[in-house]
Image (spheres, grey):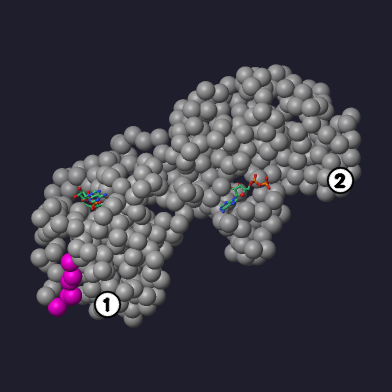
């Protein structure tokens, strides 16, 4: 699914209006109806609904929603804010359509904002995507009052005050919504960790914007959903054999962290790899042979740390390196050899990222178009550098991908995948139960298995991250997000792959 900017969304609105021969007020009515249906399914008409409307079309949406909720027997009060002579024409049209019996107040000063308690539902329709400067003055006063109340706030399209696709200036007030209901496509702002306290739980509802316009509009931003992913899974042919599905090498584990190798190996095997070999420090040899009997194990000559590469490094179709390794000098040297001698794709995680991040020499050795990095935010900082905010971080990530010709999987809620061509994909699966040690090692195993099975690096990242999150979601529904462990994620990989297969 594409993510469009505010400007592109405005064009999509205008295109749809023209193509369908409808008025902008008709489209507003459609958007407001869709919002009202969501609201009705969510909230009973037991609590009073206070709708706060700004002067633009977002406020216009709010006026239509107020009218529709009133028709559906919700007790409603409308508050308009801002100079009415500057209001948009659809706002003015809909202000006139408010029935006389619906209570309407105009707010000019902060003390006119009513007292708010948890027995009220607030709908925030102050500003949408037309916001073009930080919110100050009376609007900011209203936002502060709403934010300091215990009322449940639902924002139409986007929390008022938040820019939808660039950094909001720090001085502007922003609504802290409990729910954000947006139209047709998600906005970039919804996917950034720094906005968690503003967006709340978000949903996107269709309003019939032109599919043709959306498909023809160019963007580098995508939100990966089931529809974008399931068809990528390759069916297994009847006469295929283990050689068909690739031979993976995992260079993982260190003294006290053999579990990382076990987790990566088990996830790799559960993701369809044909053959799996691990090389682990010799202290881990028995651990691996016992815990993962399906895998072949090589013992490093060093007892505690990776210090050498297996012979015939190029017989493996994909090499996953990093989980549990540690950052010993000897390991750094081995990683240098790996970068210099391997000719197949490398999936680089954890301490391997830390080692490469701390060495310009290793960075300079990175082969082009063959590397996937899977950092969490701290590892990302070591690899790419510190960024001022989430937008800068995404920009820095794409610059890094372009400079080194690599893929970066920046892990977290809505894991972001950057490609060398400058595309950015945000994942839609996963949950906070996955914030537990070892789930990243699982991801390394999954992506390495997919690369070995000859998925393109881009598809291996997209599919791997999606299925990892899906397994996490399935695990969460079984064991809950508090008790969930990385092993639970592995245990739900079969169901996750089946889910993708069955419906494809
Ligand atoms: N008819 C349409 O085209 C549709 C519009 N939709 C709604 O329209 C919204 C966009 O409407 P608009 O483009 O009118 O934009 P907004 O409703 O976000 O507001 C823009 C107005 O606010 C003013 N403004 C911007 N920043 C301000 C600030 N910081 N302080 C004070 N005033 C400020 C602008 O000068 C302008 O008058 C969407 O978010 C969506 O809710 C939806 O109904 C879908 C259909
Ligand atoms: N709040 C969250 N929502 C969704 N996914 C999450 C969340 N927290 C962590 N994850 C996922 O869990 C994994 C954690 O990886 P990582 O931090 O490398 O853990 P470890 O190093 O312990 O294996 C990542 O894939 C990340 O996307
Ligand atoms: K809003």
Q: Quadrant of the N terminus?
A: top left
Mark seen at residue 74? 1
Choose between 48 and 284: the one closer to the eye: 48
Mark 2, ligand 2, within 8 Å: the answer is no
Q: Residue at x 34, y 54 (%)?
A: 173
Q: Residue at x 45, y 30 (%)?
A: 422
Is residue 6 positioned above or below 407 on the image?
A: below
The extreme bottom residue here reads 46
Q: In terms of sequence position, does the residue under pointer 2 or pointer 1 come before the other?
A: 1
Q: Which residue is mark 2?
A: 287
> Relative to 112, is 494 on the left or the right?
right
Query: Residue 394: percent from the left, percent from the top?
Result: 47, 37
Choose between 23 and 456: the one closer to the eye: 23
For marks 2 and 1, give the CA distance. Answer: 63 Å
Inspect this view and state whether residue 48 appears: yes
Q: What secondary structure is marked by label 2? A: helix
**In the image, which residues are magenta?**
101-106
> Relative to 422, is 458 on the left or the right?
right
Number of other residues with Cα within 10 Å of mark 1, as a class: few under 14, some 14 to 19, many 20 or more: some
């Amino acid at each position: 699914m594409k993510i469009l900017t505010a400007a592109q969304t405005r064009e999509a609105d205008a295109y749809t209006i023209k193509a369908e021969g409808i008025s902008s007020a008709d489209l507003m009515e459609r958007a407001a109806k869709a919002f009202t249906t969501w609201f009705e399914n969510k909230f009973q008409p037991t609590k009073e609904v206070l709708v706060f409307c700004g002067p633009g079309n977002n406020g216009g949406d709010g006026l239509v929603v107020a009218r529709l909720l009133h028709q559906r027997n919700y007790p409603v009060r409308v508050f308009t804010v801002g100079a009415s002579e500057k209001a948009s024409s659809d706002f003015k049209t809909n202000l006139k359509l408010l029935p006389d019996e619906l209570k309407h107040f105009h707010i000019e000063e902060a003390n006119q904002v009513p007292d708010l308690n948890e027995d009220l539902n607030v709908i925030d329709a102050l500003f949408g995507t037309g916001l073009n400067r930080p919110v100050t003055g009376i609007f900011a006063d209203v936002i502060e009052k709403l934010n300091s109340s215990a009322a449940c706030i639902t924002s139409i399209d986007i929390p008022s005050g938040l820019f939808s696709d660039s950094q909001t200036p720090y001085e502007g007030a922003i609504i802290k919504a409990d729910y954000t209901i947006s139209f047709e496509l998600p906005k970039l702002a919804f996917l950034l960790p720094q906005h968690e306290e503003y967006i709340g739980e978000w949903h996107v509802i269709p309003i019939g914007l032109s599919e043709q316009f959306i498909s023809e509009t160019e963007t580098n931003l995508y939100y990966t959903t089931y529809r974008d992913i399931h068809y990528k899974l390759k069916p297994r042919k009847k006469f295929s054999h283990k050689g068909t599905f690739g031979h993976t090498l995992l260079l993982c584990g260190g003294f006290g962290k053999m579990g990382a190798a076990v987790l990566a190996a088990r996830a790799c095997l559960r993701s369809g790899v044909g053959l799996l070999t691990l090389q682990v420090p010799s202290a881990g040899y028995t651990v691996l042979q016992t815990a993962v009997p399906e895998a072949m194990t090589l013992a490093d000559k060093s007892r505690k740390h990776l210090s050498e590469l297996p012979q015939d490094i190029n017989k493996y179709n994909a090499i996953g390196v990093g989980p549990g390794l540690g950052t010993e000098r000897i390991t750094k040297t081995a990683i240098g050899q790996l970068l210099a001698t391997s000719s197949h794709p490398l999936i680089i995680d954890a301490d391997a990222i830390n080692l490469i991040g701390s060495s310009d020499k290793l960075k300079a050795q990175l082969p082009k178009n063959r590397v996937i990095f899977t950092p969490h935010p701290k590892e990302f900082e070591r690899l790419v550098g510190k960024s001022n905010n989430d937008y800068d971080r995404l920009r820095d990530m794409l610059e890094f991908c372009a400079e080194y010709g690599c893929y970066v999987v920046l892990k977290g809620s809505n894991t972001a995948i950057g490609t060398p061509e400058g595309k950015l994909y945000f994942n839609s699966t996963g949950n906070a139960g996955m914030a537990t040690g070892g789930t990243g090692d699982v991801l390394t195993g999954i992506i390495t298995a997919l690369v070995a099975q000859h998925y393109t690096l881009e598809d291996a990242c997209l599919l791997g991250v999606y299925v990892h999150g899906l397994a996490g979601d399935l695990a969460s529904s079984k064991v809950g997000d508090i008790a969930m462990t990385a092993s639970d994620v592995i245990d739900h990989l079969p169901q996750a792959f089946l889910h993708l297969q069955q419906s494809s």
